[in-house]
Amino acid sequence: MKVLITGGMGVIGSEASRKFVKEGHRPVLYARHRDDNLIADLADKVDIALGDVTDLPRLLDVIKTNRITHIVHAAAFVGAVSQANPPLSIDVNVRGTVNVLEAARLFGIRRVVFTSAKGVYGPLTGEFGYPNYRPIPEDMPKNPKRIYDAAKQIGEHLCLYYNDTMGVDSVVLRFATTYGPGKTARHGKMGVTSQIVEAPAAGKPFHIAQGGDEKDDFIYNKDSALGIYLATIAENPKSRVYNIGSGVGSTLRDFERALRRHIPDADISIGPGLNFLGMPYPMHGIYDVTRARDELGFKCEYDIDRGVEDYLRTLRAIRV
């Protein structure tokens, strides 16, 4: 297997790259710019090809030259910048996905894994939100509100279309709320669960006025990478769309408790209430991960305690 990982130096892509290396593969990381911050330990174990997913000729050349057999599509235009620039968001997140799928069709790629997001579900209200948090199934109606989430839903539809109509074997992964090194710098205010680890680790305070009572499904990015790897190697998966999360409801106070085991005097304060991301609608909930468990063999290896411990260890080893 020779895998191309678009966005392979990003927050999730770097961990996916690390997972493939650990499993004995030498992935090709495809990105617009070289940024070694999250892959410094992989420098001699991966190949890097610079290019944009909107540049189909370049993408085709990289696939051909490297004899790619599988593609993990993790490149995306994210965060507040995406929200403020809809044309560019659609160009990268939708046309870029079309290019990946078209390249896969032309070269007979054996599997495309598309990284989607919980935001495709839209507001999580009623029984799926506070205080009941009924587990969210994959077939729940979708109602994305942000341009990024709408683009991800379109990307999902494209993958399913190419799978069903064009013969491009595709799998879609919807990640729960992710955390891990690099998210603070790359995802801005959406990286609260990374800020609560990275700020105290750097000797800085972490204060948030609200959200301490909110439960959410948090997944450490090494588990995100595990989901990607399992989806890449799965033989004839019954379903094509999978929730990838812990299936467990946790709070920011759980992060604080885990962090204080390692930094007892951390300057942290978390206010009560809900909506720690300050979104205009409720978006916190807990995944039903039965499908991923039964069909992909996926189960998180990192709970909050193990995730925070590994996160701190990683921060000591790299600079982000």
Image (spheres, rainbow, N blue to C red):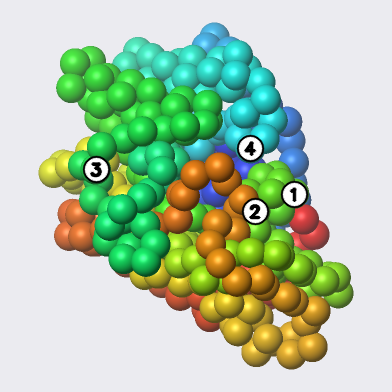
Residue highlighted by disc 1? 185
- The residues tagged by marks 4 and 1 sit, at their Cα atoms, a distance apart of 11 Å
- The residues tagged by marks 2 and 3 sit, at their Cα atoms, a distance apart of 25 Å
Q: Residues within 10 Å of mark 4 (few under 14, many from 20)?
A: some
Residue at left 31%, top 66%? 132
Report the mark closest to the observer, 3 or 1. 3
Q: Residues within 10 Å of mark 1 (few under 14, many from 20)?
A: few
Report the mark closest to the observer, 2 or 3. 3
Residue highlighted by disc 4? 79
The answer to whether one can see residue 276 in this image is yes
Residue type beneath disc 2? Gly
151 over 301 or under it: above or below: above
Callout 2: SS? helix
**Front in this rendered view, residue 97 or 272:** 272
Callout 1: SS? helix
- The residues tagged by marks 1 and 2 sit, at their Cα atoms, a distance apart of 8 Å
- The residues tagged by marks 2 and 4 sit, at their Cα atoms, a distance apart of 10 Å
Lower sequence index among marks 4 and 1: 4
Residue at left 80%, top 59%? 319
Callout 3: SS? loop
Quadrant the C terminus occupies:
bottom right
243 over 112 or under it: above or below: below
Lower sequence index among marks 4 and 3: 4
Residue highlighted by disc 2? 191
Residue type beneath disc 3? Met
**311 with respect to 285 (left or right):** right
**106 with respect to 270 (left or right):** left
110 over 92 or under it: above or below: below
x then y, percent, for residue 292: 25, 55
- The answer to whether the residue labelled 1 contacts the one labelled 2, judged by CB atoms less than 8 Å apart, is yes
Callout 4: SS? helix
* Quadrant of the image occupied by residue 133: bottom left
